[in-house]
Image: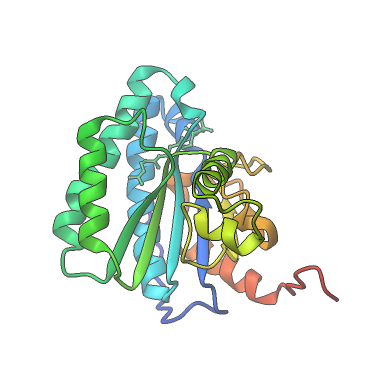
Amino acid sequence: MFGSFRRKKVETAPSAVSHIAFIMDGNGRWAKRRGLPREAGHRAGAKTFSRIVEHCIALGIPTVTVYAFSTENWRRPKQEVDAIMELLDRYIEDTFSRYADRDVEVVFLGRRDGLSPSLVEKMERLENESRGRKTRVNIALNYGGRDEIVRAVNRLYEEGKLPCDEQTLSAALDTAGRPDPDVVVRTGGDYRTSNFLLWGSAYAEYFFTGTLWPDFTERELDRILTDYAKRHRRFGGL
Ligand code: FPP
């Protein structure tokens, strides 16, 4: 379906983007419109994820974060939850083979409790094997922005580091060590943050598109990045 697009060769992002984040919304509706089960939408969404990450790597964006599963997504039917976990499991397996010699580091943001022990074992193995590589792909899984902050504060309390400053709290978050997102893209037509990267996105530029995630293309991302380059970020100043 995307074959008719001729990929524009872009060597670098139009403006220095250190970190881009995606709320991959619209998989369910994409499937419903085709009379398919929601799981088929997530499978299509996983393919889009791979394409878009590849494109970000080609653009030289050092950190890419995606919202794969929120702490609230457990409320979905078991069949759908299982399908998403299965896709993540498959992604990890693929990544071991595909990215073995690539400069890509994978980090999982979010809570490990509640996930299957075998998945957690694979996640940790991938994190350990890919640590320190150039491009970071953060996968927010069993993740909530408020939960991330609460876990960080509790850890700082246990370590006797409270009260603290912003830098200390930032360093205690799952996202520690990488810059805050410059750009957050939400597909699927809704205008909300859905508990995603609440702390880090304080000064992010948001882009909302009605495109459903499985239909999101490299070309649309290029347009977003061109638009981003025109925005004047003031960080509260003039
Ligand atoms: C939101 O769409 C999407 C999700 C809750 C799951 C996202 C998961 C994937 C793209 C696949 C696995 C990811 C990786 C990294 C391999 P929705 O289901 O809420 O869509 P709707 O709003 O149309 O119902």
Q: Position of residue 128 (x, y in %)?
A: 23, 57
Q: Residue furthest front?
A: 160
> Is 33 located above or below residue 208 in the figure?
above
Report if residue 51 is visible in the image: yes
| Foreground pick, 129 / 56 | 129
Q: Position of residue 217 (x, y in %)?
A: 45, 57
Q: Quadrant of residue 234?
A: bottom right
Q: Residue at 36% across / 69% down in the picture?
A: 135
Q: Residue at 57% across / 45% down in the picture?
A: 153
> Is 103 located above or below residue 73 in the figure?
below
| Foreground pick, 83 / 135 | 135
Image quadrant for the C terminus?
bottom right
Q: Position of residue 69 (x, y in %)?
A: 43, 37
Report if residue 6 is visible in the image: no
Q: Residue at 80% across / 68% down in the picture?
A: 236
Q: Residue at 20% across / 63% down in the picture?
A: 99
Q: Position of residue 165 (x, y in %)?
A: 66, 60
Q: Residue furthest bottom?
A: 11
| Foreground pick, 233 / 2 | 233
Q: Quadrant of residue 95?
A: bottom left
| Foreground pick, 157 / 152 | 157
Left or right of 20, for residue 133: left
